[in-house]
Amino acid sequence: MPHQKSSYRILGIDPGTAIVGWAILDVIEEKNEPSVVAYGHISTAPTDSDEIRLEEIASDLIKIIALHKPEAAAIEQLFFFKNQKTIITVAQARGVIVHTCHKKNLTVAHYTPLQIKQSLTGYGRADKKQIQKMIVKILNLTEIPEPDDTADALTVALCHANSYKFQKKLRTAS
């Protein structure tokens, strides 16, 4: 009987109201690097009400989860916004995203921008261009995914993949 590969599928999410970036990565235990399954973004119309936009985010996210069947979701935590109105709407979108992932029985992990940057570059103050270059290199991509929210979702998923591999090593060491 052939040996079956053991893998773990991650949904990375960069929350937003106008644009929600998402990415699906597989972490195959026999390999040392994650592989890209799919990525993209959910867009909502700024002319729609908050209720319609939040419903659209939830509905599209449910479709992505049903199609790709991830086991875990990694979601970027909100950090700092200059615009108070923006932080409120993004926080609402993040709440809908967390709730939707929970309803779909995904394990949900939350990472700060600092944790994400440290995970990928070893430096918590790396700029966006440095991070984007790292994801292209690590994931063997030909170009930086656009919009930035999609690239950011890949970084969140990579952060969780690194955390997953580290946690697995800890479990096997004990």
Image (cartoon, rainbow, N blue to C red):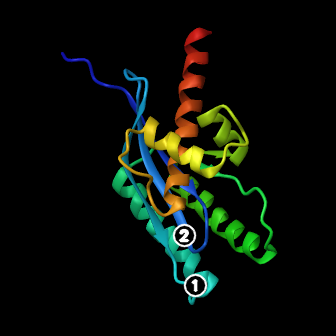
| Residue 133 at x, y percent in the picture | 51, 44
13 sits left or right of 82 in the view: left
Of the pair 122 and 75, the residue shown nearer to us: 122
The residue sitting at 58% across, 57% down in the picture is 14
| Residue 37 at x, y percent in the picture | 35, 46
Mark 2, Cα crowd under 10 Å, few <14 / some 14-19 / many 20+, is many
Question: What type is the residue that disc 1 sits on?
Answer: Pro
The N terminus, quarter of image: top left
Question: What type is the residue that disc 2 sits on?
Answer: Ile
Q: Secondary structure at mark 1?
A: loop
Q: Secondary structure at mark 2?
A: strand
Give the Cα distance between marks 2 and 1: 10 Å
Q: Which residue is mark 1?
A: 46
Hey, which residue is sitting farthest left in the picture? 1
Q: Which residue is mark 2?
A: 19
Looking at the rendered structure, the number of numbered marks drawn on it comes to 2
